[in-house]
Amino acid sequence: MNWSGIVGVGLFASGLQLAMPTALAAVGEAFSERSGVLNLGLEGMMLGGALGAFTADYYSGSAAVGVFAGVGIGVLLGALKAFLSVTLKTEQVINGIVLVIFVQGVTAFAYEKLFGSGGTQPEIPALHTVRIPGLASIPWVGPVLFEQNVLFYVSLALVPAVWLLLQRTKFGLAVRAVGERPLAADSVAVRVDLVRWLALLVCGAMAGFAGAVLVIGDVSLFGTNVTAGRGWVAIALVIFGRWNPLIVFGGALLFGVMDALQLRIQAASGGSNSGVPYEVFQALPYLLTLAVMVIATVAARRNAQPAALGIPFRKEVIE
Amino acid sequence: MTVAQSSVVLPPFQRRYAQLWTVLVSGGGVVLAFLVGGLLVVIAGGDPLAAFRSMFSGTLGSTFSIGELLVTATPLLIIGLGLALAFRGRVYNIGAEGQLFVGALAGGSLILELHASGTVLIAFAVVAGIVAGALWASVVGYLRARWSVNEVISSLLMNYIGIFGFDYVIRKPLGDPAAGNALASRQLPTSAMLPSVSGLYAHVGIFIALGLVPFVWYAMRATPFGYRIRMMGLNREAAQVAGVNTARLTVVLMALSGGLAGLAGVIQVIGVEGRMDSGISANYGFTAIVVALLGRLSAPGVLAAALLIAFLNVGGQAMSVDNGLPYSIVLAIEGVFVLFVLIADRFGRTR
């Protein structure tokens, strides 16, 4: 086996691109969970964002319009999740699953109505690679980080911004406070439900953006299972990253490199003719996610998790 | 923990008008489902009345279509009952799809490998399917009970692992080369198939499913086991203090719901497909979540919801074929329906 062909610059470049949607969604989920709301609708938000982005890009011919549409759908779904979890205070696990089922049904219909079923799948043009002059000539790092498409750079800029929002602003402090001690936050006039609403809108925007990055920046087409469980993997990676957006992001990218590695090993070992059944490689990312989540949960126990995660805020109830 | 919780998880049957409200919500939900369906048909450029007519004739119009309705309702009902039990205890198993495939794999492989046939073999296959689904799911239950690993995510991730495992077995070791790209296992001997109901185009699996309804209903309502499940669902810590072994009950609920999903998988193999292929499940493991939630996690409710969803799915196919409308209308209706019930139930609780 030609190892130098497998473990090269291309591995990291494609790995990062592969991981970016999951990583962005995971950062959004971390934000929501830090406010105390478990968002299991993430997969649905990504899927909705992906369809919004695909449709807008397809009809307008502009990737930027597509991205904004994806983010817009994500925010709308974030509002729905906030309405169900924060306003109505329905069970967060249930309303997350319901949100995914709802979006899967509606997107399946909308896509079939807009683009029909069967025949050739419509595609949107792929984004150009933008070489950053100077930086791209740095050996190793250059081709990996500075020879990507525009959305890659936007993503790289967005994640520290989310981290700053959470760690260095008054709003971020409120988010963290309502996720840990909502009663205490309430007693100093922080509007717990409002903060959680806003946190879910941020999460929805990130998930919608993640869906847009997936279809516009990577696969160029839409299918009813285009997200393929990425939203669920992202939720698992939040635990792995111990609810810190930067660690979550880094962990997700690392994960993507491992995913790219297994794809390359699979290709180099003869693809479908290889001795190892290709189903093993297909199942591997999910198995790895599961293993990583279990190890992270066991290692962290409960102390890394926001204390009020999953518990609706009610003033009258003594917790 | 807070006291009041979502009634989709715990129906407030102690309230005076709660049952009336539940009936109203369900009725309203059905009406809404048809209104939304009609609207989507119009959006898709069809005639709603013609669409509904073919839905009804495609499900209730002949003994053949009634049989198809019952065959579709069977896995939904079996899995939905298991999920209702687990969800009542707030053990959120969303891995039923994978458990179904693992159960089907165990039962189907047993039949193909033993080269035997007859009633005893069918019984062995059914037991193998149940045990395989239960073991597969109890891994998730154990992780939750031992280390508080979120069972929603772990059960969902295990779907992929189980289904890819199934794909491998039907492609390689037990694969049928004649099936070509369709990927399927070798055909099962006809003597290993479930007998069909005379006069209906359905297998006897529907009786297994129907037989489970009173059993689950009784267990939930009138046994200490059901009481413990409800206690754990209301407040896990309090149940623990009151002497409920919550760790064990979590594993038991995962195993129970996984076992029933495995049972549904075997029944699909020996009742419908006659071989192992991807056709054994039209997303039944996920649709059963809708069934359990629409049925308010009660056995009679799950029965009604399974029939309704089977009606939508089978009728939707007829509608799609007759009128050239997208089948996905049905998926959208189900999504809107389950969202409506979640919201409406919440308002029922505050009255």
Image (cartoon, rainbow, N blue to C red):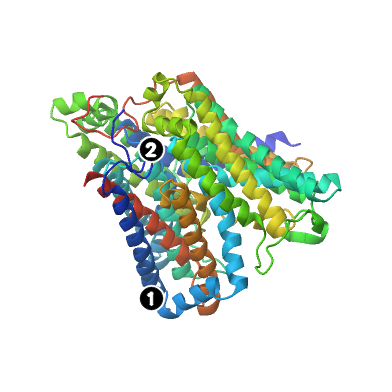
Give percent across and percent down for residue A66.
38, 58
Q: Element type at marker 2?
A: helix
Using the image as rendered, state which of residue A147 and residue B68 is in the foreground: B68
Q: What's the residue type where badge 2 is placed?
A: Glu
Q: Nearer the viewer, residue B188 or A202?
A: B188
Q: Which residue is mark 2?
A: A29
Q: Is residue A289 left or right of residue A203?
A: right
Against A311, residue B201 (above or below) is below
Residue at the far left in the pictured view: A189
Q: Is residue A157 above or below residue A219?
A: above
- Callout 2: residue from which chain? A
In the displayed structure, B195 sits above or below B54; it is above
In this rendering, position of residue A125 left or right of residue A39: right
Residue at coordinates 78% horizontally, 60% vertically from top-left? B179
Residue that mark 1 sits on: B42
Quarter occupied by the N terminus of chain B = top left
Please name whichever residue, B333 or A77, is drawn nearer the observer in this view of the structure. Answer: B333
Q: CA distance from mark 2 to mark 1?
A: 37 Å
Is B28 situated above or below A296? Answer: below
Q: Residue furthest right?
A: B115
Residue A214 in the image: state x and y as whole percent: 47, 50
Please tell me whether mark 1 sits on a helix, a strand or a loop. Answer: helix
Type of residue at label 1? Val
User: Can the viewer see residue B167?
Assistant: yes
Q: Nearer the viewer, mark 2 or mark 1?
A: 1
Question: Could you say which disc has been placed on residue B265 in the image?
Answer: none
Q: Position of residue A317 (x, y in %)?
A: 22, 29
